[in-house]
Image: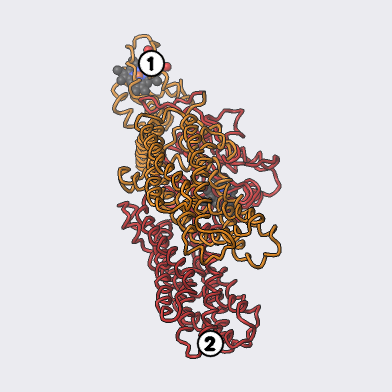
Chain colours: A orange, B red
């Protein structure tokens, strides 16, 4: 078993109590992830719809409409990501930066990867007409953008998982090690499914409007068709979540789970039954209305909130002992460090005034029995300096536990209470003064 | 010491940050802070134009410019902004971690302004073709509102940047406000604002040259307008630049009583001022040309101001980076990631004894090279690579040439390197570590080596030493 690293934290106070920052993190995170879902899900839809448009040309029109929404959604996803990033930086400074460093290449690759995906999405959007005669190339551009975007959540999930498993830090070197950590891949699929569900519901609400369909100019697609299309995918994927979700619970290390976490997650899962059955009801109706969409969204938001809280609580519980150890180590370090700084200052002051550090200690403890040239109770320092020339540690060893050496001398008392460090200063002082003159 | 050491042994960690940061600053200044008000100004020219086709041409130019700026800012611009964070978190987590703690609420406010900025730019761009007719005036107003939001984001971030050069009274009272109101803040803001405007003009010239028909009426009019825009901001650039350049050495001198550094700084700021003045004059001349005789301007010349502006900003950022060395946060944190306050304990016990991640805890006679390599990794790699940019082999070779390097000479040099080269922090380790490091450097004279960083090699965790009640450190073998 390798020791679990216990780094020291940055010794500056948090900007506010965790009590306020944590809820802020949860809310900011949900807002961010909502747009991330719509961006990733939207890009996947653009690609798939365009692919399927060979069989059904109307899908190309729909794909183009979905592509239009990405302009806003992707920008919101990025800008809303700043707040959770900021919060996680202060709340989990050590854990987050450590995970980042250990997956450093992938982590920094996020910058060109996401920027590249966005550039390609724009290119794809603005060449819709110009590349109409080269459909494969046009599709390939979307394909590369999607592939890039699919890489991004993997990096994030690897990081947030790695950060809460300090016991694995010394066995991870790079993204591919982190990807195999417990629950990373199930969480990835959970996230991808959530993206599809969310984007589908967005599709029902936005592209399923009569007004949109009228303007879009489909050949055969009708608004109910579109609603049914999106509802079907949302429903099917949602069922899948009941397999993936429990897999996550089972693969996560159990020491972050307690009744509260389990209850929160289960409540979320139970709530989700309602919107999913509503999707089913909508699907059964011939026109696949949007009437229940609001309820579905509200209830799913409740589910997402439960999941996010459960996730946060899990991390908090799992990291609590490590956080405490870090706090202790930090405190210990600060006190050791300032003690060392104090000693160093003292020494330099003493040296500046021509005295040594050992002198005051010698005067307080040894002077009663030892003088420079004459015998008091113990032998003179000149004699001692002769015996221990170049061997200050010998004096330390002696003074920690003096033996009985000289005839007619009493036993010298031990000075181990002073500690080796101080005795060493005394020894230096003795050798120095006795050698002088 | 407490974070795994991310390291790029060819590009250099600072190179990574520099690429991302310069890209971001150029895009941000030219295409957002300065670009948006320029576009709103051009759009307003269209609204004001009495002639219908002219109005349309101005509008089309402004929109095309926006489309280009929008394309770049919402992709590379946005991501390099986040990238500065990500890279800083990798390269110097101590610095960015400390800054975020101090500036959390500033950054949080920044984020709110930033969200506003993004929402506004989306609205401005996407509503361009919808808010027409009577709504056009509101659209121009929206543009200026967006310009204000862009400027505010910069105004906040500049506080953080100038704090990194001179924390002012934060050194003693450690509050957000005193960090924010540091002495270099206003001069820097006064400089950056007009620079951004001029840069936008420089980029605007390029865009105009390529999106309007050659030698057309609108091209000439637009070049004249943008030339005027640049000329109007130019004097403020000089005033702001002068104010800033004179404040920096004063502030740095107060920070660092190192005579040598002040000398080097004087040279630096001298050089910087020469570049600054030269570039500004050249940009000014071309702007004047655009103003007076736009039709005679060759296309290539139109590229010059944009390139010079990048050079100008690059130099400026370099001086800024340089002036805060050897610190990441002056007086508090060195740029090698070690806090100044921790030097006494580290110089007594050694960094290997206290590092959370290290492959060597204790130096023995047969692990000196390995130990020295770890010391190098922990204390020098924030600025040096082995053979890449600012490679240690090359800088040492530069000092000692091809004759056999000597451990004792290097040992002595490392002990005083902060005096010899004041942009380097003092060596944080103890005597034996200094010698081990010197041994490793000598070893490098005849051996190839690459330091991969924790992202490739992972980390090693050894048991921490125990401290006895009397203060002695016991290192388990």
Q: Which residue is mark 1?
A: A401
Subunit of mark 1?
A: A
User: In the figure, is residue A177 to the left or right of A349?
Assistant: right
Q: Position of residue A57 (x, y in %)?
A: 63, 59
Front-lying residue, A172 or B470: A172
Instruction: Please say whether residue B456 is visible from this viewpoint.
Output: yes
Subunit of mark 2?
A: B
Nearest-to-viewer mark from 2 and 1? 2
Vertical order, B33 against A267 (above or below) = below
Label 2: element kind: helix
Q: Residue B408, located in which quarter of the rendered image?
A: top right
Q: Position of residue A2 (x, y in %)?
A: 51, 26
Q: Position of residue B95 (x, y in %)?
A: 45, 49
Vertical order, B421 against A325 (above or below) = below
- At 46% from the left and 32% from the top, the residue drawn is A249
User: In the figure, is residue A144 to the left or right of B71?
Assistant: right
Same chain under badges 2 and 1? The reply is: no
Pick out the residue farthest to the top.
Answer: A407
Q: Position of residue B347 (x, y in %)?
A: 46, 38
Q: Residue A339, located in which quarter of the rendered image?
A: top left
Vertical order, B430 against B292 (above or below) = above
Front-lying residue, B321 or B297: B297
Label 1: element kind: loop
Q: Residues within 10 Å of mark 2 (few under 14, many from 20)?
A: some
Q: Which residue is mark 2?
A: B54
């Amino acid at each position: 078993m390798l020791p679990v690293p216990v780094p020291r934290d940055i010794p500056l106070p948090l900007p506010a109590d965790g009590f306020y920052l944590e809820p802020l993190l949860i809310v900011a995170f949900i807002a961010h992830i909502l747009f991330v879902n719509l961006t990733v899900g939207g890009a996947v839809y653009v690609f798939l719809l365009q692919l399927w448009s060979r069989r059904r040309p109307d899908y190309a029109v729909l794909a183009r409409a979905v592509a239009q929404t990405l302009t806003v959604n992707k920008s919101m996803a990025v800008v809303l990501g700043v707040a959770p990033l900021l919060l996680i930086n202060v709340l989990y400074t050590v854990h987050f930066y450590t995970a980042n460093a250990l997956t450093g290449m992938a982590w920094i690759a996020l910058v060109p990867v996401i920027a590249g995906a966005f550039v390609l999405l724009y290119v794809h959007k603005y060449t819709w007409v110009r590349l109409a005669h080269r459909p494969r190339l046009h599709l390939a551009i979307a394909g590369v953008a999607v592939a890039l975007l699919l890489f991004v959540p993997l990096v994030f999930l690897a990081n947030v998982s790695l950060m809460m498993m300090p016991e694995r830090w010394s066995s991870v070197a790079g993204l591919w090690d982190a990807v195999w950590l417990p629950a990373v891949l199930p969480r990835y699929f959970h996230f991808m499914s959530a993206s599809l569900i969310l984007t589908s519901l967005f599709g029902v609400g936005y592209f399923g409007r009569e007004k949109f369909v009228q303007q879009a100019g489909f050949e055969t697609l009708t608004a109910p068709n579109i609603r049914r299309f999106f509802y079907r995918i949302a429903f099917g994927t949602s069922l899948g979540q009941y397999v993936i979700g429990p897999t996550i619970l089972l693969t996560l290390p159990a020491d972050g789970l307690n009744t509260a976490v389990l209850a929160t997650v289960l409540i979320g899962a139970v709530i989700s039954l309602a919107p999913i059955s509503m999707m089913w009801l909508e699907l059964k109706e011939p026109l696949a209305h949007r009437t229940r969409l609001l309820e579905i969204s509200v209830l799913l938001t409740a589910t997402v909130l439960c999941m996010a809280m459960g996730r946060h609580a899990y991390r908090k519980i799992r990291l609590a002992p490590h956080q405490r150890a870090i706090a202790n180590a930090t405190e210990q370090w600060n006190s050791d460090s300032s003690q060392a700084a104090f000693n160093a200052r003292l020494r330099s002051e003493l040296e500046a005034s021509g005295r040594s550090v050992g002198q005051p200690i010698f005067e307080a403890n040894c002077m009663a029995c030892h003088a420079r040239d004459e015998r008091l109770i113990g032998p003179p320092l000149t004699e001692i300096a002769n015996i221990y020339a170049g061997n200050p540690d010998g004096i330390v060893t002696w003074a920690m536990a003096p033996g009985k050496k000289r005839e007619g001398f009493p036993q010298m008392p031990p000075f181990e209470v002073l500690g080796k460090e101080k005795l060493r200063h005394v020894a230096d002082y003795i050798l120095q003064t006795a050698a002088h003159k | 010491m407490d974070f795994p050491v991310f390291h790029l042994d060819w590009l250099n960690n600072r190179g990574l940050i520099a690429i991302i940061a310069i890209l971001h600053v150029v895009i941000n200044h030219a295409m957002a802070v300065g670009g948006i008000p320029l576009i709103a100004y051009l759009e307003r020219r269209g609204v004001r134009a009495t002639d219908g086709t002219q109005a349309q041409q101005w509008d089309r130019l402004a929109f095309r410019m926006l489309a280009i700026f929008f394309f770049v800012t919402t992709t590379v611009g946005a991501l390099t902004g986040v990238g500065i964070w990500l890279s800083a978190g990798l390269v110097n987590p101590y610095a960015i971690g400390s800054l975020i703690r101090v500036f959390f609420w500033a950054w949080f406010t920044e984020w709110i302004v930033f969200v506003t900025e993004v929402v506004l730019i989306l609205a401005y761009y996407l509503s361009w073709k919808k808010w027409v007719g009577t709504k056009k005036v509101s659209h121009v107003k929206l543009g200026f509102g967006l310009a204000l939001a862009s400027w505010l984001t910069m105004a906040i971030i500049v506080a953080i940047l100038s704090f990194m050069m001179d924390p002012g009274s934060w050194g003693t009272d450690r509050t957000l406000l005193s960090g924010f109101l540091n002495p270099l803040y206003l001069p820097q803001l006064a400089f950056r604002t007009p620079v951004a405007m001029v840069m936008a003009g420089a980029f605007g010239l390029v865009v105009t040259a390529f999106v309007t028909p050659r030698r057309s009426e609108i091209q000439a009019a637009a070049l004249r307008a943008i030339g005027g825009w640049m000329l109007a901001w130019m004097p403020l650039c000089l005033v702001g630049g002068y104010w800033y350049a004179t404040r920096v050495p004063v502030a740095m001198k107060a920070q660092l009583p190192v005579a040598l550094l002040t000398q080097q700084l004087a040279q630096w700021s001298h050089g910087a001022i020469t570049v600054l003045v030269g570039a500004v004059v050249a940009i000014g001349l071309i702007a004047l040309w655009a103003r007076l005789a736009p039709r005679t301007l060759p296309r290539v010349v139109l590229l010059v101001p944009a390139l010079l502006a990048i050079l100008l900003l690059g130099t400026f950022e370099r001086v800024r980076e340089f002036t805060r060395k050897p610190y990441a946060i002056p007086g508090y944190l060195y740029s090698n990631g070690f806090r100044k306050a921790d030097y006494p304990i580290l110089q007594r016990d050694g960094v290997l004894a206290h590092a959370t991640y290290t492959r060597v805890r204790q130096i023995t006679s047969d692990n000196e090279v390995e130990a020295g390599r770890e010391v190098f990794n922990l204390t020098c790699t924030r600025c040096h690579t082995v053979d890449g940019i600012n490679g240690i082999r090359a800088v040492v070779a530069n000092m000692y040439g091809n004759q056999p390097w000597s451990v004792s000479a290097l040992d002595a040099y490392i002990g005083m390197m902060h005096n010899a080269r004041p942009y380097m922090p003092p060596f944080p380790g103890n005597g034996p570590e200094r010698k081990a490091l010197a041994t490793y450097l000598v070893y490098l004279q005849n051996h190839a080596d690459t330091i991969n960083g924790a992202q490739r090699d992972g980390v090693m965790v050894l048991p921490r030493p125990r401290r006895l009640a009397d203060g002695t450190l016991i290192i388990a073998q």
